[in-house]
Image (cartoon, grey):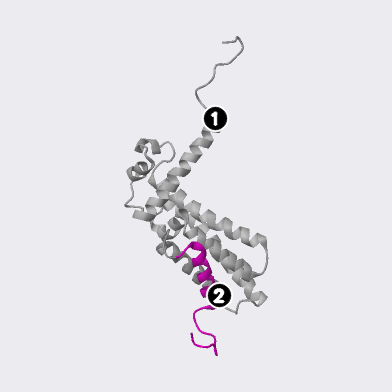
Amino acid sequence: MPKNKKPDSPWAPATERGLQRQVKRDAVLATAAQLFNERGFHATSLDDIAARLNVSKPTLYYYVKNKDEILIECVRNGLQMMTEGIEETRKAGGKAIDQLIACIRIYTRIVTLDFGMCVIRISDDEMPAQNRTELRRLKSGIDMAFRRIITDGITEGSFRPCDPKMAAFAVAGALGWIGRWYESGGEYSPDQIATQYTELLLTGILQPPGAPPI
């Protein structure tokens, strides 16, 4: 070995190790979210998660503390995806009706993904008490975003006068329910669901007066 040459280290640089750890932690969370949605939180064990990842249970503890932490991170990821998607829509501007349509499509797509389904399928009561406040704050932010869009639409005249709070509950409630019945590879794709829900939420199911029978 040349006098001034440092020996090669068998360990990757710290930054690379950090990235590898994050990738593996993300895989743990994604796998857990799938299992929580398939079996339910209480029926899923760390052994189940480890088995699907083809690792030992002790290996999981390098990436997460316990199953409660996994649950919190899965729900937090889903809520942040919703929050960021709605915020990007608002920043893009445009009329309230266009923003609402975009939000319906974003929300529909997210609740058909594993992290989004966790938000819908797992109740607040299953969360550790110390984390409920943060998660409820994120949910409240999503609700308020829908209310602002609806309020703007009423002001613009594109939405009929109504209670924005009740309207936001109706829209978010309808969209959230998708996360309970949706199955990947089922009869409708997320885009098809979003299209039908947009029409139903904006025009309802009543035939306009004078419309010819189908």
Q: Which residue is under mark 2? A: 202
Q: Is residue 67 magenta?
A: no
Residues at discs 1 and 2 in contact (Cβ within 8 Å): no
Q: Amino acid at mark 1?
A: Ala
The x, y position of residue 90, in whole percent, is 64, 62
- What numbered label is drawn on residue 30? none
- Dot 2 falls on a residue whose secondary structure is helix
Q: Is residue 212 magenta?
A: yes
Residue at the (55%, 75%) spot, across then down: 202
Q: Amino acid at mark 2?
A: Leu
**Closer to the eye: label 1 or 2:** 2
The span shown in magenta is 188-214
Pick out the residue farthest to the bottom.
Answer: 210
Residue at the (66%, 75%) spot, across then down: 155
The x, y position of residue 25, in whole percent, is 46, 41
Closer to the camera, 9 or 156?
9
Q: Residues within 10 Å of mark 2 (few under 14, many from 20)?
A: few
From this view, report whether residue 170 is shown above or below residue 46: below
Q: Is residue 144 in sight in this rendering?
A: no
Residue at the (36%, 53%) spot, across then down: 41
Q: Quadrant of the N terminus?
A: top right
Residue at the (57%, 66%) spot, across then down: 146
Tell how many labels.
2
The x, y position of residue 159, in whole percent, is 61, 76
Of callouts 1 and 2, which one flags the residue occurring earlier in the amino acid sequence? 1
Q: Measure the C-alpha gap from mark 1 to mark 2.
A: 52 Å
The x, y position of residue 148, in whole percent, is 61, 67
Q: Which residue is under mark 1? A: 14
Pick out the residue farthest to the top.
Answer: 3
Closer to the camera, 61 or 38?
38
Closer to the camera, 171 or 211?
211
- Dot 1 falls on a residue whose secondary structure is helix
